[in-house]
Amino acid sequence: MITPMEEYLFDLQGYTVIRGALDLDHIRAMNEWIDALPPLAVSQWVGNVYVHTYGGIDGMNLQDIIEGGEIFERLIDHPAWIGHARHYLGPSTKPYIYEIFVNVRGPAGYIGVHSGGHNVDHQQRTGRKNGQWVCTMLSLLAPLNDVGPGDGATVVIPGSHKSDLPHPMQDKRGGISASSGEQLEGAVEIHLKAGDALLFNDALCHGSAQRINPGQRRMITMRYVPAFVAHRFGYEPSAELTARLTPEQLAIVQQRQPQRRPNAGSTD
């Protein structure tokens, strides 16, 4: 249940924190799955999960992690946040997953700040229009281990989704800046316990601080968009995954069943 104060602050600041969204057994199972992985390289596949990076310094992304099994499938429409996603996307659409991955990041890693209300991309960036919610991209981050000072926390510039000006230290195009997020004046680090979730309007200027502590930062990252938007990388769920999902989950990861000519590709 979203309270009027939570809704007001989400509109004003562009983000909200959902404490204790994931239970500890679920977190433990996901960490054990990651611990069991062999050494991986970018572009390598682990079953139907593939390894990706946005720039190297941001770490390793296990893209389409929902192909990793039931423990990840639960994330698609997790009750701790799916109601929030439906609410802030607005009543005229349904949620669709633009991308979903686990980011694994070691010492010195970070992702530069990007986005902001000034970034013209033909999307509704403030999140409100004519008295109703119309967020065109929501990001959901849920750490699999505690993220505190020195751990490379997500940083945001509160309210920046409403600004028509870029941050004076930011890339004016709204692209990913080269430096880590804690260097921007006005940036706020969002410290989270394992299992908390950070939901924000992706138009918010955001990035991460540089990790200076040893060990790994492990973060579930999901982006929900209106159902008319395509998947970021053209991902098509595997037959094995679609057979396991509920109809409600399938609608969030596959808008429509692909239509192909019968026997397409057959050599008969």
Image (tube, rainbow, N blue to C red):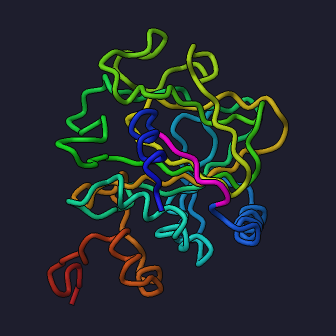
Instruction: Find out whether residue 133 is within the magenta segment.
Output: no
Chain part drawn in magenta: 15-20
Closer to the camera, 83 or 176? 83
Residue at image coords 46%, 79%: 241
Furthest residue toward front: 4
Residue at image coords 74%, 71%: 29
Q: On the image, which quarter does residue 265 sit in?
A: bottom left
From what the image shows, is residue 22 above or below residue 159?
below
Instruction: Find residue 41 and report its horizontal and vertical position in percent.
Output: 64, 50
Please name the predominant secondary structure of the magenta segment in the image: strand
Residue at image coords 50%, 31%: 206
Q: On the image, which quarter does residue 68 sit in?
A: bottom right
Instruction: Find out whether residue 16 is within the magenta segment.
Output: yes
Which quarter of the image is occupied by the C terminus?
bottom left
Q: Is residue 166 left or right of residue 27?
A: left
Q: Is residue 43 left or right of residue 134?
A: right
Instruction: Find residue 221 and report its horizontal and vertical position in percent.
Output: 54, 52
From what the image shows, is residue 264 above or below residue 154?
below
From what the image shows, is residue 124 above or below residue 20?
above
